[in-house]
Image: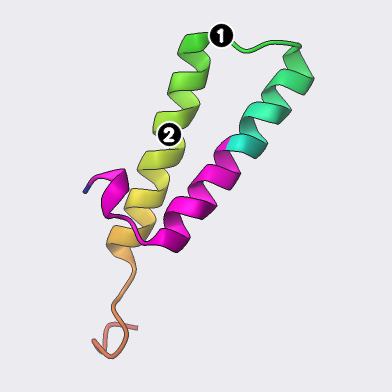
Amino acid sequence: MKFEELSEQSQEAAREVLVYTLKKEIDSRGDIASNRAKYLTHAIRNSFIALEAEQPKRGSGED
């Protein structure tokens, strides 16, 4: 699954988490390395993809 295939709600939530995480990182360290920013971006993206992929569909009886 690609990021673009996530629901709009998941995409927006992932963006908000990324912004919050990057701000905290910059506040904590004063700066953020490019490779660290990429790592965080990929980790957040992969987390949201995993969450949405395992989410049972409504009415599927898998609740």
Q: Name the residue located 24 percent from the left edge and 45 percent from the top edge.
A: 2
Q: Is residue 25 above or below residue 59?
A: above
Quarter of the picture holding the C terminus? bottom left
Q: Name the residue located 71 percent from the left edge and 19 percent from the top edge.
A: 26
Q: What amino acid type is highlighted by mark number 2?
A: Ala
Query: Which numbered dot is residue 43?
Result: 2
Query: Percent from the top left, x then y, of residue 51?
Result: 38, 57
Q: What amino acid type is highlighted by mark number 1?
A: Ala
Q: Name the residue located 33 percent from the left edge and 56 percent from the top edge.
A: 6
Query: Percent from the top left, x then y, of residue 29?
Result: 74, 13
Q: In terms of sequence position, does the residue under pointer 2 or pointer 1 come before the other? A: 1
Numbered disc 2: secondary structure: helix
Residue 59 among those drawn in magenta: no
Task: Using a 10 Å C-alpha cutoff, classify the residue at mark 2 as few (fewer than 14 neighbours), some (14 to 19) or many (20 or more).
Answer: few
- Quadrant hosting residue 60: bottom left
Residue 10 among those drawn in magenta: yes
Numbered disc 1: secondary structure: loop
Which span of residues is magenta-colored? 2-18
Horizontal relation, residue 11 to residue 29: left or right = left
Q: CA distance from mark 2 to mark 1?
A: 15 Å
Query: Which numbered dot is residue 33?
Result: 1
